Image (cartoon, rainbow, N blue to C red):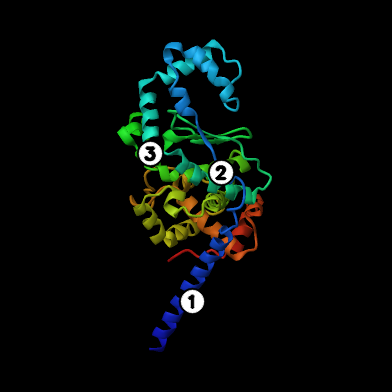
Amino acid sequence: MKDKCLYIIGVLLILIVSCTESEGYKKKLKVPFKNLEPQEVEIIEFNKALFALDTANFEEEYRALLPKYPEILFDNPDEQEISYMKSFVTDTFLIRINELVNETFPDIELVADEVKGVYQHFKYYFPDWIVPPTFTYVSGDYYNRPIGIGDESIMIGLDFYLSNKDLVYDKVGLPRYISRRCQPFSLTRDLAEAFYYQCQGSRINQKSVLAEMIEQGKRLYFIEALDPSLPDSIILGYSAQQMAWADENEGQVWATVVGNDMLFNNDLKQRRMLFNDGPFTSAFAEQAPARLGEYVGLKIVRSFMSNNDETLTTLLKMTDYQDILQRSGYKPRK
């Protein structure tokens, strides 16, 4: 009876510690953002204006469009650019894509409300940021990032969020494990990630598995900081089943990494197993999602932020990865 009581007490203590760690980082993400700029976001639907041009008189109408969009269009386009833009808006596949965008996002104000929250969170962490105009566009190119952030404009490719209507992503050869993420609810996640790349610049592969884990964890934590309402499945791009597998097998994944001396290794095969994208990670199970190194990295960073008095901006600058791991007190689920 005594042993049973001690066991129950032990379990309760573990749960209390877990809840405390969870609450620790979540409390940091509850920042006073609602009174920050912008109080309103106007999203300019450039895709609608472009596809509405009269193609029978395209050059004249396109040139008339230029002064209205100085942030994103060249002042004096040559014949080659005009020819390209005309072929773009007369492409039957892209015309259908634009129609699907208009069907999927009939009220752009709803998108503006979601975007505003991400902008305000970013303004909280980076108060000197000046909010540029926001435009929507259609690209038809699904192998690049959907959202671009510059000093003069923010460009949101709404055709990345069509839920594979009309099997549009299948038609361009996009793998299902990628197109599954192309949902309207992923827009703010991708916007937050675009801000991360704007702050951190282009990523380079780290020198060890641990370093890569933590850098990827920083990226995902940054995304969560800019939209704390996002569930883990969207942050990581996992299905509900994949998310459940990762949570249930977190201890097994960590034991494999530590037990095989992978943390301070830079073996290409091991890196691929932990960080390459794909439908699953066969080294663990067919139910196991890809990029499990990112999953563990996010857990380590969350634990670090729960147990240390650091800010998001200081976290981004840290490069002593072993110190971060030690100070995190990370303990995976068994």
Instruction: Quickly name the residue at label 2.
Output: 40
**What residue is shown at x 60% (from left), y 48% (from top)?**
122
- Vertical comparison of 62 with 237: above or below: above
Instruction: Say which of marks 1 and 2 sits in front.
Output: 2
Of residue 106 and residue 95, the one placed in the foreground of this image is 106
Q: Is tag 2's residue or tag 3's residue first in the polypeptide sequence?
A: 2
Local crowd size for mark 3, using a 10 Å CA cut-off: few (<14), some (14–19), many (≥20): many
- Vertical comparison of 86 with 235: above or below: above
Instruction: Quickly name the residue at label 1.
Output: 13
Local crowd size for mark 2, using a 10 Å CA cut-off: few (<14), some (14–19), many (≥20): few
What label sits on residue 259 in the rendered view?
none
**What residue is shown at x 41% (from left), y 88% (from top)?**
2
Q: Is tag 1's residue or tag 2's residue first in the polypeptide sequence?
A: 1
Of residue 84 and residue 54, the one placed in the foreground of this image is 54
Q: Position of residue 18 (x, y in %)?
A: 49, 68
Q: Residue furthest bottom?
A: 1
Instruction: Quickly name the residue at label 3.
Output: 179
Give the side of residue 216 with respect to residue 315, left or right: left
**What residue is shown at x 63% (from left), y 64% (from top)?**
308
Q: Amino acid at mark 2?
A: Glu
Instruction: Say which of marks 1 and 3 sits in front.
Output: 3
Q: Residue furthest left?
A: 166
Q: Amino acid at mark 3?
A: Ser
Q: Amino acid at mark 1?
A: Leu
Q: Position of residue 6 (x, y in %)?
A: 44, 83
Q: Secondary structure at mark 2?
A: loop
